Image (cartoon, rainbow, N blue to C red):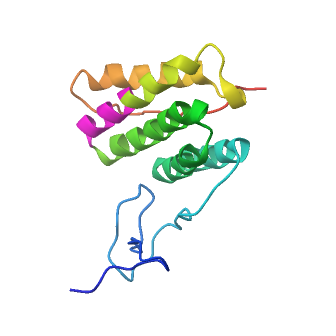
Amino acid sequence: MAERERDARGKPLNARPRDGLGRPLARGGSGTPRVPEDLRLPPGAAIVEAQRFLDANMPFHAHEVLEATWKSCPDEERELWQGLAQLAVGLTHLLRGNRVGAGSLLRQGHDRLVGFASNPPHRLDVAGLLTWSEGLLADLETGTLPIAPGIPVLRAAD
């Protein structure tokens, strides 16, 4: 068995190509370009980049952008960015057909964002994200996958 790829510090990497929903493809194949593991964007740029991926039906990639921001943000925003990342990966699971995983992650993301609804930072549309996730969660409670989950909109309209 081939040894796993590692970075310069010996940290394991997953260099396999991935499809648009983040599923690993066969080695040597071509996939969707990956989000760099060392990506660190300021909040405004992270929101724009994540929305670009969501609009392109690539929520896994949006999740990676949001997760990178969550890991480098100030402590008082950690719940916010973790919640946003969980909504994106919850949508990923939904689009992959994983109803249980989608429900769990959408619920966790939703619950983390509730505390930011009254004073949303970075012009985020927290109320709209809560409404979007609540609709999906209600659909999932029926035991079926929503037919058209829609694209979450991260920022409020100007």
Judge by depth and name the residue closer to the eye, 132 or 66: 66
Per the image, is 103 magenta?
yes
Instruction: Where is residue 115? Give x, y as percent.
Output: 53, 18
Q: Where is residue 44 in the image (x, y as percent from the top left)?
A: 72, 41
Which quarter of the image is occupied by the C terminus?
A: top right
- Quarter of the image with the N terminus is bottom left
Regarding residue 151, the answer to whether it shows in the image is no
- Is residue 122 magenta-colored? no
Of 151 and 76, the residue lying toward us: 76
How far from the left and from the top, in percent, is residue 36?
56, 65
Give the answer, above or below, for where 139 lies relative to 59.
Answer: above
What predominant SS class does the magenta segment belong to? helix
- In terms of depth relative to the viewer, which is nearer, 96 or 8? 8
Question: Is 77 drawn above or below residue 9 in the view shown?
Answer: above
Q: How many labels does the image show?
A: 0
Q: What stretch is highlighted in magenta?
A: 98-107
At 62% from the left and 13% from the top, the residue drawn is 118
Q: Is residue 43 left or right of residue 56?
A: right
Q: Which residue corresponds to the image point at 42% horizontal and 20% vertical from the top-left?
A: 134
Q: Position of residue 155 (x, y in %)?
A: 67, 31
Asked if residue 76 is positioned above or below residue 93 in the image, the reply reads: above
Q: Nearer the viewer, residue 104 or 143?
A: 104
The answer to whether residue 50 is seen in the rendering is yes
Answer with the quarter of the image where residue 16 lies.
bottom left
Identify the residue shown where x is 59% and y is 48%.
72
